[in-house]
Amino acid sequence: MLSFLYHLSHDFELSHGYHANLLYINQAHFDALRQQLSEIQDLAKLTQFLGMDIVISEEATHPHVVWQPIEWTKITA
């Protein structure tokens, strides 16, 4: 999973000229990612490691990355 995500973000950067900052992923893929990166327990540290915020959505049948101008982790209600 990690290798796949690396290629996704690398291809995104080559296509657009800037880094993706948001990863859309479903629960099954997220669980596989967490298993591969089991040494990273904290979600904040995982997003820091990936360099992207994570959106878990069952509509994301395949992981995909995008760039969003909004930093979701800094929004408060």
Image (cartoon, rainbow, N blue to C red):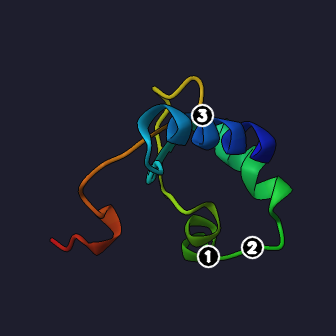
Give the residue displayed 70% in from the left and 37% down from the top: 7
Residue 49, x across and y down, in percent: 65, 68
Residue 30 seen in the figure:
yes
Residue 40, label in figure: 2
Mark 2 to mark 1: distance in Å? 7 Å
Near-viewer residue (46 or 8):
8
What is the quadrant of the N terminus in the image?
A: top right
Give the residue displayed 30% in from the left and 49% down from the top: 68
Q: How crowded is mark 2: few (under 14 residues within 10 Å), some or many (20 or more)?
A: some
Residue type, numbered disc 3: Asp
Mark 3 to mark 1: distance in Å? 23 Å
Residue 61, x across and y down, in percent: 56, 23
Q: How crowded is mark 3: few (under 14 residues within 10 Å), some or many (20 or more)?
A: some
Residue 11, label in figure: 3
Q: What element carries label 1?
A: helix
Q: What element carries label 3?
A: helix
Question: Which residue was labeled with disc 1?
Answer: 45
Residue 25 seen in the figure:
no
Residue type, numbered disc 1: Lys
Q: What element carries label 2?
A: loop
Residue 71, x across and y down, in percent: 29, 64
- Whether residue 30 sits left or right of residue 40 in the image: it is left
Q: Nearer the viewer, mark 3 or mark 1?
A: 3
Q: Which comes sooner in the sequence, label 3 or label 1?
A: 3
- Whether residue 29 sits left or right of residue 72 in the image: it is right
Q: Which residue lies furthest to the left in this view?
A: 77
Q: Which comes sooner in the sequence, label 3 or label 2?
A: 3
Give the residue displayed 72% in from the left and 48% down from the top: 31
Residue type, numbered disc 2: Ile
